């Protein structure tokens, strides 16, 4: 379609293109309506023109003037009859009748002349009669009128009815000549009407031809405009349809066709472009979020493995502590038995002085064995204290790893929220796109479900971490209690060792202090009673250590079960990542490197 520029440089094509589709269709209808209105107006103008011209020609110019000439002819005919009645009936008529007929003759003749003159005055308003000539004798109506005036005067002067002067035959010939002039005048009016009618027909044909040409030109313009608008709409719809088919095929690598107009199709083209860009952005965000989620899952599983190893080490240490506590209980029982034996020896020493040397040797031997047991117990207590310090270190590391897992869970939760927000934005864009955005709405719904599943998984992990943290705190508290008990046990063992050393020293001086045996026996009895109390305390502490180690082992089993649950959740997260990756890989993106990285990760 040819473009015409206006003063601002806008072309007719751009003006039409930037109108709404309804406006474009309205332009076509309006153009057709304008053609119809123009034709109706033209027809009305032509009809009115013909009507006015016909009325002016047939009524004002022809009919009225013809009627005036015919009336004049009739009046002159009546005047001629009165004249003939006077001429041929002169002997039979009295004076009164002659006067009456003569009066009628004068009146009718003057009346006829007056009507002719009046008709001529009327025709003077129409300039066409100045030059219009009769087809027979080449006279104008005014020339015929002059000839009529002459013949009228000749007719009047050829015979005087009152005096009888003149010739009746000449008078009749003049009358005939006068009437012929009137008939010619009537004929020239009729011929004029015929010529005007022919001219009206010719003008009507010309006007009709002009109307047909104008209507045809406008119709051709409307057809060209309609073809342009329909072609523009068809091509634009085909381009938009092709873009939507590419989106439906999950191909985002193509360059969408832009319709550079301000109508609905231009807005739809911009919406398709926005949908493609939004979908690309969402998929890139999903890819990025999936990578972060994969890394977080791996870190969680890695830290879970570290915690699992730490808990296994703690369980092994607890088993060693339990075994040490069992040996400690046995040693405490042996200690009590030895102390009981020591009491028997003291009693025997009191009863049998002569067996003092043997008893002293036995006590020396028993004391050395007890000292060995105490040394072994002291070594076990030191091992227990070192083991519990290792437990504290492992619990501290476990607590730090739990904090790192919590941060990873917060990151996963944040990513789930971002994914949910992106899904919401994608759903809104799909709703704006209407039917074209249904496929994208399904993707957005799947992403929303994935974000909800991820959020639910993070809640489960967070609950497990809270339980694990509580168990770690409980294990730390119990371990601190056991540590205090071990410290007390170590102090008791140290004190026992000191007592045993005192016993050994006393036994070495037995031979030198036989005279003071009774006093030493009393001291030994007191020492025995004190050692008996310490042995009972050591036995009770050993039982408490055993119970604490059992409770700690139970807590560690719960921690290990929680770690297994975390590993299971990590496997579920990996499965979700694989599902997201398969879903994203269905789309053809320009940045395929991101998909390759996602696949490698």
Image (cartoon, helix red, strand yellow):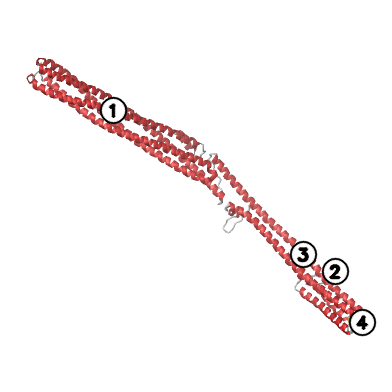
Q: Earlier in the sequence, mark 2 or mark 4?
A: 4
Front residue of 134 and 123? 123
Residue 195, image x and y in percent? 79, 66
Considering the image in quadrants, where does the C terminus appear? top left
Residue 401 visible in the picture? no
Q: Earlier in the sequence, mark 4 or mark 1?
A: 4
Residue 303, image x and y in percent? 36, 33
Single out the mark in the foreground, 4 or 3.
Answer: 4
Q: Which residue is mark 1?
A: 549
Please give left or right for residue 216 compared with residue 185 in the image.
left
Label 4 close to label 3 by CB (< 8 Å): no
Secondary structure category for the residue under label 1? helix
Q: Which residue is mark 4?
A: 92
- Count of marks, rendered view: 4
Q: Which residue is mark 2?
A: 136
Q: Earlier in the sequence, mark 1 or mark 2?
A: 2
Find the distance from the CA under tag 1 to the CA under tag 3: 132 Å
Single out the mark in the foreground, 4 or 1.
Answer: 4
Secondary structure category for the residue under label 2? loop
């Amino acid at each position: 379609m040819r473009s015409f520029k206006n003063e601002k440089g806008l072309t007719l094509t751009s003006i039409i293109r930037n109108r709404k589709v309804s406006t474009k269709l309205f332009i076509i209808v309006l153009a057709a309506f304008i053609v119809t209105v123009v034709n109706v107006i033209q027809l009305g103008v032509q009809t009115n023109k013909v009507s006015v011209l016909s009325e002016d020609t047939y009524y004002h110019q022809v009919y009225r003037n013809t009627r005036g000439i015919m009336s004049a002819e009739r009046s002159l005919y009546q005047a001629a009859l009165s004249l003939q009645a006077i001429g041929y009936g002169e002997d039979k008529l009295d004076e009164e009748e002659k006067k009456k007929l003569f009066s009628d003759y004068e009146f009718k003749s003057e009346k006829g002349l007056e009507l002719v003159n009046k008709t001529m005055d009327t025709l003077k308003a129409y300039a066409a009669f100045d030059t219009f000539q009769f087809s027979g004798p080449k006279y104008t109506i005014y020339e015929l009128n002059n000839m009529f005036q002459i013949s009228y005067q000749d007719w009047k002067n050829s015979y005087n009815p009152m005096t009888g002067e003149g010739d009746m035959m000449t008078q009749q010939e003049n009358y005939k000549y006068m009437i012929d002039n009137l008939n010619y005048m009537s004929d020239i009016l009729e011929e004029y009407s015929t010529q005007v009618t022919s001219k009206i027909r010719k003008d009507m044909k010309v006007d009709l031809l002009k109307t047909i040409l104008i209507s045809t030109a406008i119709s051709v313009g409307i057809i060209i405009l309609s073809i342009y608008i329909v072609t523009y709409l068809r091509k634009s719809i085909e381009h938009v349809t092709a873009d939507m088919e590419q989106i439906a095929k999950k191909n985002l690598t193509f360059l969408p066709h832009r319709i550079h107009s301000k109508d609905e199709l231009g807005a739809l083209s911009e919406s398709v472009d926005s949908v493609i860009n939004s979908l690309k952005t969402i998929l890139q965000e999903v890819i990025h979020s999936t990578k972060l989620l994969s890394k977080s899952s791996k870190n969680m599983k890695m830290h879970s493995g570290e915690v699992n190893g730490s808990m296994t080490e703690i369980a092994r240490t607890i088993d060693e502590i339990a075994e040490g506590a069992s040996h400690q209980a046995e040693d405490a029982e042996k200690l009590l038995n030895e102390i009981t034996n020591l009491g028997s020896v003291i009693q025997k020493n009191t009863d049998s002085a002569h067996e003092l040397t043997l008893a002293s040797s036995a006590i020396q031997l028993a004391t050395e064995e007890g000292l060995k047991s105490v040394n072994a117990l002291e070594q076990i207590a030191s091992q227990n204290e070192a083991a519990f310090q290792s437990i504290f270190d492992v619990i501290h590391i476990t607590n730090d790893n739990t904090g790192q897992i919590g941060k990873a869970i917060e990151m996963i939760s944040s990513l789930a929220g971002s994914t949910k927000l992106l899904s919401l934005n994608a759903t809104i864009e799909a709703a704006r796109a209407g039917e074209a955005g249904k496929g994208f709405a399904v993707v957005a719904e799947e992403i929303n479900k994935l974000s909800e599943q991820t959020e639910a998984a993070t809640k489960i992990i967070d609950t497990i971490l809270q339980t694990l943290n509580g168990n770690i705190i409980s294990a730390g508290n119990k371990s601190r209690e056991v540590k205090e008990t071990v410290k007390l046990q170590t102090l008791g063992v140290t004190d026992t060792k000191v007592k045993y050393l005192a016993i050994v020293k006393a036994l070495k001086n037995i031979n030198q202090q036989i005279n003071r045996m009774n006093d030493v026996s009393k001291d030994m009895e007191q020492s025995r009673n004190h050692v008996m109390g310490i042995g009972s305390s050591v036995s009770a502490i050993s039982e408490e250590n055993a119970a604490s180690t059992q409770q700690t082992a139970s807590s560690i089993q719960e921690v290990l079960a929680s770690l297994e649950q975390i590993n299971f959740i990590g496997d579920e997260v990996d499965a979700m990542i694989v599902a997201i990756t398969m879903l994203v890989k269905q789309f053809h993106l320009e940045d395929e490197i991101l998909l390759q990285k996602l696949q490698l990760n």
